[in-house]
Structures are given as structure tokens and as C-alpha cells.
Amino acid sequence: MSPTVTANAGPTVLQPAAPAPRASAAPSPLGRLVALDWMRGLVMVLMALDHSSDAFNAGRVFGDSAGSWHAGTPIAADQFFVRWVTHLCAPTFVFLAGTGLAFSVRKELSSGKTQRDVDRYMLTRGVVIAAFELWISYFVMPKGQYLFQVLYAIGTSYLLMIPLRRLGDRLALVLAVSMMLGLELVCGVLLGSYGGRPPLWAMLLFVPGNPPHLFIGYPTLHWLALMLLGWCFGSYLIRNPQTAVDLARKLLAAGGALLLCFAVVRGLDGYGNMALYRDDASVVQWLHVSKYPPSLAFDTLELGICFVLLSLLFALSATRAPRPASLLLVLGRTPMFFYLLHFPLLVTAAQLLGVEHKLGIPAAFLGATTVVAVLYPACRAYGRYKAAHKQGWARYI
């Protein structure tokens, strides 16, 4: 029986072209995966809060690595949790980028495109996404300085996924997990070998750094591991149509297992923490994990939370029809467009008002709420345009 792709636009799963005689007893296919859109939309809202805090909040906590944190420094709990809740953004964004890539590749191939066509699309999109760091840098960095963060990580991971997508799913999963487990060892070797000042190639791939004219916050390979995991998740959904309720149960179990792994790694307080160890047994210290670069503790904590939330969203999608104009759905279907506009708007507003890095937490929430409200109509219009021009330039953003 030959498979076909469901007719709904956006992420879909394969289902049989002709149902078997007893299909009524089988689980209904997932069809449109609105839970993934909702999750991306939630991430965009949280990202707006983080970047609003970066623009307005004088007390923002930013010490998410051993290299930028001094052991024993007091941490204000309110500032910490405003920062910590947004840690979900980058790993979820990258993970779901891998999931979306799996759907996009399958859709392209099912429509008659060749492997070379798919490679060309991935090459173009990867370069475009990475190049948008120049746009972000223009607004947030001093003249002549460039920031390599999440867009750089996603774009370069896209390029590396061109050959890696040809791996079998099991091998891709093994590679992703091996990278999450082993990159801390590689980082330690590199830092030791170069006296704490690794060369440019090492900073681009393994360890954050500040070479001349650059600030590299997201070395590629740590985030490639998360994109590979997302790719495997997308491939699993394509191969295994199932009810949203069944998937919700599996995601909840997987999320619980990841959170248990986090508790073990953080509790041992050794390898797996990227040298950002606990000062004491307080909740803040348990959750104060390394994002730059991502530690095993960070990955398991954030992916665990991501999976639990996805479980809830899939369960919700089984009982509630999505409203096309809902905030999370609109932002979740235009995440890159929102990202490229919200950060410059926040930074520019703070500078024009003369309050950059001068206010507090309330200003961070107000800024996030305002930028989401301002960009919602634009995102909705862009979403309609993108849906009407599937093969145009908008497919790269």
C-alpha cells in the first residue's frame, strides 16, 4: 500500500492511501500537528520576555556558564527565574527546527523533488538563516562587532544536516545522544590544550568565545545534537501515525525520563555540568545550569520540560479545535519572521526611550507584552502570504 501525505498545509504525517477493511478500529492519524505550532508560539512569547529583559532590565541575570559566573555569587531569585523560564526557548526552537526539517524533506521528496533539489533548499535556507545574524548584530552589537548566536547555530546545523539526513534514524539518534554525552569532554580537552584560548574553528564548533570582532555564543555542534534529535522525532511521527492521546502519553514518559536524568546528573554535580557546579542544595542552584555551551544537565532539563509541555499540548489538541487567529498558533507558524523583528524593536525602543538596561522586571514584562501585541497583526499577515506563496522567498524565513 503506497503512502500519501495528508492534504492539510504544514507539518503532517503519512497515512495509508486506502484504509484497511478494519480501519475503524485503528487509531486516527494525527493530521495537522497544531501542538507543535502551539509550542513554537509559546517559545516565541518566552523569547520576547528574555530579549525584553535584555533590553530594559538592569538586574538581568546572565551567568549561564562557568566562564561567566563566579562561584559563591549571590543570585536574586526573582531575576533568576525570569531568566530561567526562558531557557526553554533555544533548545525547543532548535529541536522543533529539526522536526520541521524532517517534514519538509519528506514533503519535498513526495512532491517529486530530487535529493539534489532538497540539498539545494537546505543549503540556501541554512545560509540565509545564518546570514541574518548580521541583521541582529546591527541592532544589538557595537559597530564592527558581530554576534553568532541561535541563528548561526540553526543555519550551520542546517548545512551539516545535508549529509547527516542520509543516516538511518537509529544511527542519527545514536550520534545525537553521543554528542550530548561527549562534547563536554571535547570542550575540556580543547580548553586545556590551548590554555583557555582555543582557535577560531574550535569556538565556531565547540566552545563559546570572543575572537576579534565576534562574540560566539552558540557553537554549532552542541545545537546540531538537538536538531538531530528533532529530526529523529519528526521521522518517528512520519513513520508511526497514531492518535494525539497516544503520543501525549509517550511524550510524558520520555519527558519524565529526561527529568530523572537531569536530577541524577545535577545531583552528582560532576561531569555533565560543564563545570558550572552547585554552590549549595537550593532550588536556584539546582536549576542554575550551563547554557553556554549547553551541558548535559541543561539539555536533559530543558528537553524534559519541552516533552512534558508537548504532551499536554497534544492532549489538548485531541479535544479542542485550533483557532487560526489564536496568538500561539499565529506566532508558531511564523517564528523566524517574529524573531527577526522582535529583538531589533525591543532594543531600538529601549535606546530611543533612554532606558536601555535601566529599569526592572516589570519593564521586561511590559516590553514583551507590547512587542507581541505590535507584531501579532504583522505575523498574521505574513502567515497568510507565506501560505499563498509556498514556493516563493518566504519558504526560507
Image: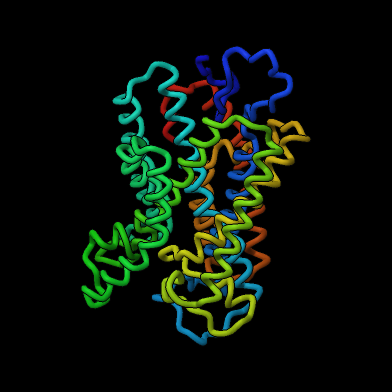
Q: Is residue 202 left or right of residue 289?
A: left
Please tell me which residue lies in front, 176 or 38: 176
Please tell me which residue lies in front, 124 or 313: 313
Q: Could you tell me residue 279's position as x and y percent?
A: 54, 84
Please tell me which residue lies in front, 168 or 292: 168
Q: Could you tell me residue 382's position as x and y percent?
A: 55, 31
Residue 191, above or below 49 = below
Give the color scheme: rainbow, by chain, secondary structure or one colour: rainbow
Rendered residue at 48%/35% (across/down) = 235
Residue at the right extreme of this rendering: 319
Residue at the front extreme of this rendering: 22
Residue 389, above or below 299 = above
Q: Could you tell me residue 302's position as x and y percent?
A: 56, 58
Q: Is residue 92 left or right of residue 185?
A: right
Q: Is residue 26 left or right of residue 7?
A: right
Rendered residue at 63%/15% (across/down) = 19
Please tell me which residue lies in front, 75 or 163: 163
Residue 261, above or below 242 = below
Rendered residue at 53%/17% (across/down) = 4
Assign the C terminus to one quadrant of the image. top left
- Residue 159 appears in the rendering: yes
- Number of marks in the image? 0
- Residue 142 appears in the rendering: no
